[in-house]
């Protein structure tokens, strides 16, 4: 029973599956037929579109060929026009070169003049009163195209303005950097053309790079400062004497840069100080010796006017030898007088050899400083070469200054020594003359007694 039931169920299942399979195949057939029909339609449309596009491509090809022929004709025309323009351009360039010859030379001159004018105006003291004048000239000097008539006129006006201002004395207010490096605003300044600028009796210098007025840290001689002060205080329309620097401050800068006496002496260094010490000592000693000889000479002159011998002078001490013993014989008196003269000669000549030594040693010490300075110079050359002469300045300055100091000390000491020696010899000659006179008078008296 069970088996029969299973067989019935299997038969029913098989029948159901067969019915479903038959339905599915029918649907598949319909779908395939629809797909084939759709593809045929699409292929037909694609074929028609291809045919249309093929016909359009043929038309486009004909149009492109027609355009190509037109462009080739146009190219031929343009080529002919280009060749004609090339020939015309060569002719025009040749003509332009011929006509630009003088203009090019003029342009070069304008650029050169503009550059020179720019440098002059930037360095001119007039720029302290009229600033921003060099910008136009800087642009004109660097330009590549020809200047216009208006620009040439403007450059000419700048030149004439500079010439005009160079002959004026103007009072203005400007910022000034004083000697301490402090900026003083709106300080009253007097400009003398393009040569000098002064303020409060002090000379100023124009710095073209910084476009500032700078007070010189070292001023020229006092008389020039007085002239500057009088000029600043002068009333309008009056005339005042004033010294100007025709090089627009270059000579003034060199003058104030020159070392003064103290700086010159400092350049001599240790050797220079030694020479100065020798000179000061020699002068003081010579003055003392001169005073001594002057006093002794006056004492001897007073003794000449008196008969009585005195012990406070050399001549009195010589005469006293005779007055103390007038009866002694001539030979003995002569020997005693010679001895007294020798005794008085030594104090009169004392110190003169020392002065002689000083005026001989001073130039020798100066020569020593010269040698030391040259050694220093050659050491600088060995270390740094000869590229910068300022590196050798200290050694050369020492060599020259010590030589000068040695001569400055030696020359007056030589003259003083000669004068003192002459004075000493004159006094000794007085003693010898008086001694000889005493001996002659005594011999005359003795000879008269003998007769």
Image: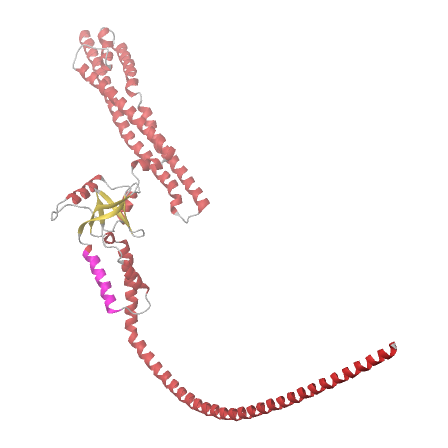
Q: Main secondary structure of the magenta part?
A: helix
User: Vertical placement of 33 versus 322: above or below?
Assistant: below
Residue 150 x/y as whole percent: 23, 67
Q: For residue 373, which quarter of the picture?
A: top left
The colour mode here is secondary structure
Counting from the top left corner in percent of width and height, residue 355 is at: 31, 26
Residue at far front of view: 1
Image quadrant occupied by the N terminus: bottom right
Placement of 223 over or under 79, stated as above or below: above
Tell me which residue sits at (29%, 38%) in the image. Answer: 260
Question: Which residue is nearer to you in this view: 309 or 181?
Answer: 181
Q: Which residues are magenta?
A: 148-164
Name the residue: 31% across, 32% down.
409
Q: Is residue 97 magenta?
A: no
Residue 296, above or below 401: above
Depth check: 72 or 41 in front?
41
Q: Give the quarter of the image for residue 230.
A: top left
Camera-side residue of 131 and 369: 131
């Amino acid at each position: 029973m069970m088996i029969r039931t299973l067989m019935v169920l299997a038969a029913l299942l098989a029948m159901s599956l067969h019915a479903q399979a038959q339905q599915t195949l029918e649907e598949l057939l319909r779908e395939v037929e629809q797909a084939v029909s759709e593809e045929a339609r699409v292929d037909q449309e694609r074929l028609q579109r291809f045919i249309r596009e093929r016909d359009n491509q043929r038309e486009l090809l004909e149009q492109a060929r027609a355009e190509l022929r037109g462009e080739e004709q146009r190219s031929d025309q343009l080529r002919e026009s280009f060749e004609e323009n090339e020939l015309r351009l060569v002719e025009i360039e040749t003509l332009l070169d011929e006509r630009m010859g003088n203009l090019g030379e003029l342009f070069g001159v304008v650029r050169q003049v503009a550059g020179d004018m720019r440098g002059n105006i930037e360095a001119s003291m007039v720029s302290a009163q009229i600033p921003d004048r060099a910008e136009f000239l800087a642009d004109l000097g660097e330009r590549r195209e020809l200047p216009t008539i208006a620009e040439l006129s403007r450059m000419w006006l700048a030149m004439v303005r500079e010439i005009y201002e160079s002959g004026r004395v103007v009072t203005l207010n400007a910022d000034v950097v004083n000697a301490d490096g402090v900026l003083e605003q709106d300080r009253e300044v007097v400009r003398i053309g393009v040569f000098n600028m002064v303020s409060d009796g002090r000379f100023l210098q124009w710095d073209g790079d910084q476009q500032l007025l700078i007070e010189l840290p070292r001023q020229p001689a006092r008389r020039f400062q007085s002239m500057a002060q009088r000029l600043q205080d002068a009333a309008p329309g009056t005339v005042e004497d004033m010294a100007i620097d025709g090089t627009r401050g270059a000579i003034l800068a060199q003058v104030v840069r020159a070392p003064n006496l103290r700086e010159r002496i400092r350049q001599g260094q240790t050797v220079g100080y030694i020479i100065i010490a020798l000179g000061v000592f020699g002068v003081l000693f010579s003055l003392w010796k001169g005073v001594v000889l002057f006093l002794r000479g006056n004492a001897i002159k007073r003794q000449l006017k008196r008969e009585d011998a005195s012990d406070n002078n050399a001549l009195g001490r010589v005469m006293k030898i005779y007055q103390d013993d007038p009866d002694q014989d001539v030979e003995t008196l002569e020997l005693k007088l010679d001895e007294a003269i020798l005794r008085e000669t030594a104090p009169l000549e004392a110190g003169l050899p020392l002065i002689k030594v000083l005026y001989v040693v001073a130039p020798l010490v100066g020569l020593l400083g010269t040698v030391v300075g040259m050694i220093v110079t050659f050491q600088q050359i060995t270390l740094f070469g000869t590229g910068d002469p300022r590196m050798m300045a200290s050694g050369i300055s020492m060599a020259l200054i010590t030589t000068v100091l040695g001569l400055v000390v030696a020359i007056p000491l030589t003259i003083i020594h000669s004068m003192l020696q002459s004075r000493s010899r004159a006094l000794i000659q007085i003693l010898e003359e008086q001694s000889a006179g005493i001996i002659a008078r005594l011999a005359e008296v003795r000879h008269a007694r003998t007769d």
